[in-house]
Image: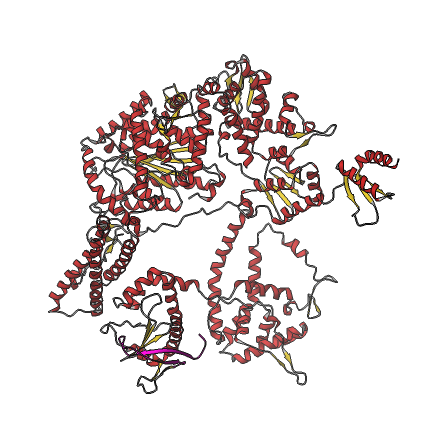
């Protein structure tokens, strides 16, 4: 899957886009404290930058209401150490992260919170893809990009279309999406993202050994992946979830305009607003005009 | 560019060849650990990283589980490298199972780097002490100029406007292998010298550094110290000033040489003096990587034997001048033509057609590099033809002997000449005419032999 | 295929069970004749192709012998050939013959009866030979498609047209590649049309073809304009062309003075003689468009044609510029330029050239359109040229094809998913119910960040014992996937089944998909045709359903049942819908009749 324009660059130079889930509602209920998670991730980022001077790391925070770039190793130059306590870049990152969290909180509208507290994965995925596209266009010399989703929140069904679009455009540009899912059950979105783009999906069995998972599996550059077998996730959940009740379904109704999926007949598509034809069964006693298609 | 790799590897071989005690001492310095880590093949880097938190031996079998059939040789190379550099310790236990452990000093140092960040051995000087620090562009320009100046001096000692402070004995060492000097003639570039010019700057730098280090023992400097200082230097921040008084005496001497190469810029303040590392220095550890990055090409060759080089470098111009006629020199463009005359002078200098062609191909401008072939076929063919033209006739001064009185004498003479390996031609046996041609240098022997025979 | 007659040894059967009468089949352009070897046999006949309404044949590679079945309204002729080669030759011939007689038979075929009752499939549309061949080709190329075709079309579950209707794209895609090459504008100089002179009489003859007329219109907008205004209101077409060639003749004599004199007398003739006003204005406009930095004066200075020993020779004499009577002169360079411009423009009209009037109008139309698009074209070209092409960056990046999933992947996942549901239900309890308010949640997040800020990454390393367990766990995961699924990690659950079962399952899956596609697309049922079709489909599906049940009884019960489950589910849904719909229609049929055009 080596892309043609990167031939001139060293094989193992990576551009790692890290999507960091900062959904407060997930982390306050998670068995792994956010501080532990974050410190493992920071150590991992340090190690990526340690491996090769040309390696580049960009961190995008995926919040509950917004997402934002919080770190880019190509623009921040200070390498040193912050009084020997931790690498200086981490201080920068934490500072930006804190600002981001505060901003994210301000955006929240009280009372709007509902059962599913998913984070804005579609937004950060799109930002990552845009960044990579810019890198692609910067000339024939660029590092090999890949995306790593560090996600904990459950899938937000309302983002289904946006996320699937992002996944397909990643696949088309030959960008791999790795995902490390910290939540309790599997994330169908990320499973599909990694499956379709040829990345790795992993759900750590021992969350407190996160750094070990990251350094063993996700630190592997694209060049080395040709020689190594990485964990293969079996049982990718290809089934789409319906948009109305977030149920995973085998058979359903599909909007012919935006391909949104519903588990039962609706008068109007809740995603794109297309009005479906009246079910003829009422008038003419023939069956639904909206055709069912087996979902595969 | 395969040569680049060879030289970079050679340097690591040099490190690997250090005695175990010295190597362990090197690893006590976190920078060395980082530089060494970066020089490893990609797979080896990954192995080090995944062993970072593990303190018990890991079986070779479990590591092989991960390797795909395609990757077996890469895996082997990576492991060998790690063992060679004493980063991995291999043990075979009683059950004949091979296990690996990470060098504990190396491990601790890497962990420290990850958790606490890089702590430089010296802090940059505060900006109120160091006035008039050069801008990054100036520094870049300085480094390039210095390096090019050094290279020009290296190839062509006479043409230099402003000779650097590098002692001529040092220069001789650098020139060893790159230039060949026949007595009284101007030194000429050897084949490897030409190849040296074709490498990218970092690779050239490492070549020179390697020569510098291998020569260090003669100057009474410990090579391990020198290696560790150079690697340490590569982690300093470009453009920051560092007090020279933080250096040891040996290092102070070294840094003066490095300034001549353009690795650092020295400045003198009112009280202190300081050095400013340039990009050349900070790139030292980058260029050690096995998969070295290649610089972008700049040459476009047309089918009409014209060549356009998008370059501002004087050095490039010099290199092109080796085998082409440079016609115009514009601010960012050199226009030249490959002519028979220019090529003949290149061939005379011992540059081969293949070297020229591979230089043109390797430095092809990205826009033409995609094309196959990147250099027009008619040009490459013609370059080769002109080279073979020169090789068609070989001149050997010789003497022609004929009018032998007897067949015996003739055969005896020809055997004698053959004994000296000097017989170039003799009449076929059935021919009535008896004549032979012998190299001129053996004429004396021949004459002696013939006069002896006549008696 | 161009041969007019085919003679083959074959045996004739009136029914499939019939043992057959050996004999010789002779096919000619419009009929086929069968002569049995035994002259006493009654099975001799002589049928014209125009009565034949359908033909089909058995496929090579099946267990059936090479049969060709030709059917007319009330009987069918089945021929068994010695080899498939003979069959193919005859089939192709019949296809051709049918296509030829097709036009004649159109009327009769419109009234053809549907063949559903007999269960024999007939093409219910007359297909052109090309289309038939395309379908054959598609079937031959895709063995899976061929299998489906065999299974459903030959057995009568689907008709030929129903089968292909869902694959319009396949048929289209192929025809698009074979698009006709457009004929360009002729590059030979029409302006050089030389008259034929009769030596004895004082008469010149010009040859005029529709093609030449079109070329004249395209090259000379003034003539074109004149034609539109004068013909037929003021003069006949014949007069028009006579006048035109009179002017041409004058030009060819290079007698500018004479031309000027004649033009003064006849104002219509003057149109042809004078400089083309439309072209001239166009030329002026073009000059205005030229980049102002271009030094036109200098270019004009390069014109040496008027100097001695310079100039263009044409027909042995020099093409000289005369300043006098310039209005009535045309230079070769002008002609060449105009010709070149029109040729580059290409053929802009695509109408029958026979009627000059329609040609003239169509050309006018296209000229008006091109004016707008030409401007755009020019701008595009400029933007493309501004960057030096030599060093231009790429504008496109390599992209991969969007992947279309292999149905195998779907099977693969279902097994693990089934196992996983157990897993998930166990781990699902791990998550604590989030009971914090928004502020508290965000607060705890910020707290975590500042905690790291204060203490650093000190305790972020993984304890060695945990690290080794994680590594061992991952290693085990990798080796287990390797050995569970065979040596190759790309192998799937499906591949662990014996080959025969695997093939069977995949084939059933394909069949089910095909049937379901037809099934669901026939709803709502508005015609009797659709209801019979649905019935047919349902029968076929229940047959497959039973076959699936049988496969489930095989040795690999566990894996197979997991794979079969989604298929059964899909079929069940279809059956359910069928029954519900049937009941609804039965309940209603008392009152109204199903109306097709609702």
Percent position (x, y) of residue C68?
34, 74
- Horizontal side of B441 relative to C302 (left or right) equals right
Pick the front one: B276 or A278: B276
Residue found at the far top of this picture = B271
- Horizontal side of C191 relative to B33 (left or right) equals right
Q: Quadrant of residue C208?
A: bottom right
- Whether residue A73 is visible here, answered yes or no, is no
Percent position (x, y) of residue A221?
40, 36
Pick the front one: B179 or B415: B415
Percent position (x, y) of residue B397?
79, 39
- What residue span does the magenta drawing correspond to? C1-30
Percent position (x, y) of residue A158?
25, 44
Residue found at the far right of this picture = B455
Instruction: Answer above or below: position of B406 versus C196.
Output: above
Q: Residue at x 28, y 56 (%)?
A: C504
- Whether residue B447 is visible here, answered yes or no, is yes
Q: Quadrant of residue C167?
A: bottom left
Instruction: Answer above or below: position of C106 versus C463.
Output: below
């Amino acid at each position: 899957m080596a892309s043609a324009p990167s031939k001139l660059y060293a094989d193992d130079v990576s551009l790692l886009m890290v999507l960091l889930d900062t959904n407060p509602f997930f982390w306050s209920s998670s068995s792994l404290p956010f501080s532990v998670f974050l410190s493992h991730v920071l150590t991992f980022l340090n190690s990526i930058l340690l491996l090769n001077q040309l390696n580049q790391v960009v961190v995008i925070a995926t919040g509950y209401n917004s997402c934002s770039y919080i770190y880019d190793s190509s623009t921040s130059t200070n390498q040193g150490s912050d009084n020997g306590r931790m690498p200086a870049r981490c201080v920068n990152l934490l500072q930006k992260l804190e600002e981001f969290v505060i901003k994210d909180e301000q955006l929240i509208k009280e009372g709007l919170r509902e059962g599913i507290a998913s984070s804005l994965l579609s937004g950060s995925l799109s930002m990552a893809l845009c960044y990579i596209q810019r890198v692609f266009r910067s000339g024939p010399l660029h590092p090999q990009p890949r995306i790593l989703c560090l996600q904990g929140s459950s899938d937000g069904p309302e983002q289904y279309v946006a996320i699937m679009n992002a996944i397909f455009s990643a696949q088309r540009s030959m960008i791999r999406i790795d995902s490390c899912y910290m939540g309790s059950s599997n994330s169908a979105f990320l499973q599909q993202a990694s499956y379709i783009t040829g990345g790795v999906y992993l759900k750590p069995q021992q969350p407190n050994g996160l750094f070990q998972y990251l350094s063993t599996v996700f630190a592997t550059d694209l060049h080395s992946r040709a020689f190594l077998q990485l964990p293969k996730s079996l049982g990718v959940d290809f089934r789409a979830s319906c948009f109305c009740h977030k149920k995973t379904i085998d058979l359903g109704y599909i909007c012919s305009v935006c391909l949104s999926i519903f588990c039962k007949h609706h008068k109007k598509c809740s995603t794109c607003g297309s009005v479906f034809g009246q079910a003829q069964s009422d008038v003419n006693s023939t069956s639904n005009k909206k055709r069912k298609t087996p979902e595969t | 560019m395969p040569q680049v790799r060879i030289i970079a590897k050679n340097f690591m071989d040099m490190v690997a060849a250090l005695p175990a005690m010295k190597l362990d001492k090197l690893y006590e310095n976190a920078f060395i650990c980082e530089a060494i880590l970066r020089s490893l093949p990609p797979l080896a880097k990954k192995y080090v990283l995944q062993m970072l938190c593990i303190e018990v031996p890991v079986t070779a079998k479990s590591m092989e589980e991960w390797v795909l059939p395609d990757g077996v040789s890469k895996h082997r190379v990576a492991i060998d490298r790690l063992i060679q550099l004493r980063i991995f310790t291999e043990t075979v236990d009683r059950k004949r199972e091979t296990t690996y452990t990470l060098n504990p000093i190396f491990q601790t140092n890497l962990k420290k780097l990850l958790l606490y960040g890089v702590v430089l051995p010296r802090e940059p000087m505060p900006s109120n002490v160091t006035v008039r620090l050069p801008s990054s562009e100036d520094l870049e320009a300085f480094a390039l100029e210095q390096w090019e100046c050094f290279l020009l001096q290296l190839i062509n000692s006479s043409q230099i406007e402003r000779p650097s402070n590098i002692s001529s004995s040092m220069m001789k060492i650098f020139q060893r292998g790159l230039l060949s000097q026949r007595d009284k003639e101007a030194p000429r570039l050897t084949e490897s010298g030409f190849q040296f010019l074709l490498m990218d700057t970092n690779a050239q730098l490492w070549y020179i550094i390697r020569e510098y280090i291998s020569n260090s023992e003669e100057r009474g400097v410990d090579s391990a110290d020198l290696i560790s200082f150079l690697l340490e230097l590569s982690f300093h921040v470009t453009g920051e000033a560092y007090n020279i008084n933080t250096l040891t005496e040996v290092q102070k001497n070294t840094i003066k040489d490095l300034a001549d190469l353009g690795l650092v810029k020295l400045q003198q303040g009112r009280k202190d003096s300081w050095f400013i590392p340039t990009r050349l220095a900070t790139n030292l550890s980058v260029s050690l990587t096995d998969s070295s990055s290649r610089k972008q090409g700049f040459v476009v060759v047309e089918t009409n034997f014209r060549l356009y080089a998008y370059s501002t470098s004087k050095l490039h111009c010099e290199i092109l001048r080796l085998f082409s006629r440079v016609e115009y020199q514009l601010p960012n463009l050199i226009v030249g033509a490959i002519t028979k005359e220019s090529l003949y002078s290149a061939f005379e200098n011992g540059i081969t057609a293949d070297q020229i062609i591979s230089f043109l191909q390797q430095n092809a401008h990205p826009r033409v590099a995609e094309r196959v072939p990147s250099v027009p076929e008619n040009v490459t063919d013609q370059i080769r033809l002109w080279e073979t033209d020169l090789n068609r006739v070989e001149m050997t001064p010789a003497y022609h002997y004929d009018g032998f009185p007897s067949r015996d004498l003739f055969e005896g003479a020809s055997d004698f000449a053959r004994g000296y390996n000097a017989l170039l031609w003799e009449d076929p046996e059935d021919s009535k005419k008896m004549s032979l041609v012998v190299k001129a240098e053996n004429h004396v022997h021949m004459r002696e032999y013939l006069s002896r025979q006549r008696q | 295929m161009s041969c007019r007659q085919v003679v083959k040894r074959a045996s004739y059967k009136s029914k499939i069970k019939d043992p057959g009468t050996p004999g010789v089949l002779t096919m000619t352009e419009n009929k086929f004749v069968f002569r049995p070897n035994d002259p006493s046999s009654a099975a001799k006949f002589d049928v014209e192709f125009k009565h034949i309404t359908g033909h089909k044949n058995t496929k090579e590679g099946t267990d059936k012998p090479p049969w060709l079945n030709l059917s007319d309204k009330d009987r069918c002729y089945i021929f068994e050939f010695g080899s498939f080669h003979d069959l193919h030759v005859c089939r192709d011939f019949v296809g051709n013959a049918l296509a030829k007689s097709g036009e004649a038979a159109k009327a009769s075929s419109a009234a053809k009866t549907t063949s559903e009752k007999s269960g024999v499939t007939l093409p219910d549309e007359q297909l052109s030979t090309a289309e038939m061949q395309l379908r054959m080709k598609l079937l031959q190329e895709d063995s899976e498609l061929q299998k489906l075709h065999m299974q459903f079309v030959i057995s009568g579950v689907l008709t030929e047209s129903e089968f292909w209707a869902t694959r319009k794209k396949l048929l289209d895609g192929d025809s698009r590649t074979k698009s006709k090459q457009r004929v360009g504008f002729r590059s030979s100089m029409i302006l050089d049309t030389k008259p034929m002179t009769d030596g004895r009489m004082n008469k010149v003859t010009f040859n005029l073809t529709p093609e030449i007329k079109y070329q004249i219109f395209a090259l000379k907008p003034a003539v074109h304009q004149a034609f539109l205004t004068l013909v037929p209101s003021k003069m006949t077409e014949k007069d028009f062309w006579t006048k035109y060639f009179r002017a041409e003749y004058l030009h060819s004599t290079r007698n500018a003075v004479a031309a000027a004199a004649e033009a003064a007398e006849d104002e219509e003739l003057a149109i042809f003689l004078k400089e083309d006003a439309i072209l001239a204005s166009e030329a002026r406009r073009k000059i205005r468009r030229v980049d102002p930095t271009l030094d036109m004066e200098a270019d004009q200075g390069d014109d040496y044609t008027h100097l001695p020993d310079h100039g263009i020779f044409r027909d042995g004499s020099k093409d000289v510029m005369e300043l006098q009577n310039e209005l009535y002169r045309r230079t070769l360079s002008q002609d060449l330029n105009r010709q070149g411009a029109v040729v580059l423009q290409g053929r802009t009209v695509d109408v029958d050239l026979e009627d000059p009037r329609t040609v003239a109008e169509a050309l006018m139309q296209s000229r008006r359109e091109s004016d707008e698009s030409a401007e755009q074209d020019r701008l595009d070209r400029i933007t493309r040229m501004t960057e030096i092409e030599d060093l231009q960056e790429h504008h496109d990046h390599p992209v991969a094809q969007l992947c279309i999933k292999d149905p195998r992947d779907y099977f693969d996942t279902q097994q693990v998913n089934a196992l996983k549901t157990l897993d998930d239900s166990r781990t699902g309890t791990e998550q604590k119910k989030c009971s914090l308010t928004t502020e508290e949640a965000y607060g705890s997040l910020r707290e975590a960040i500042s905690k790291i800020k204060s203490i650093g990454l000190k305790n972020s390393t993984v304890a060695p014992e945990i690290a080794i367990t994680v590594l061992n766990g991952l290693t085990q995961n990798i080796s287990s996937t390797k050995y569970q699924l065979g040596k190759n990690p790309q192998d799937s659950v499906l591949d662990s089944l014996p080959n025969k079962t695997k093939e069977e399952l995949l084939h059933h899956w394909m069949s089910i998909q095909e049937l379901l596609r037809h099934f669901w697309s026939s709803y709502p049922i508005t015609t009797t045709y659709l209801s019979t079709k649905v019935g047919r489909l349902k029968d076929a599906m229940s047959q497959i359903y039973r076959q699936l049940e049988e496969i489930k009884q095989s040795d690999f019960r566990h894996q197979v049942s997991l794979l079969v489950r989604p298929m059964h589910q899909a079929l069940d849904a279809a059956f359910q819908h069928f029954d519900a719909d049937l009941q609804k229609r039965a309940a209603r049929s008392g009152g109204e009749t199903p109306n097709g055009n609702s």
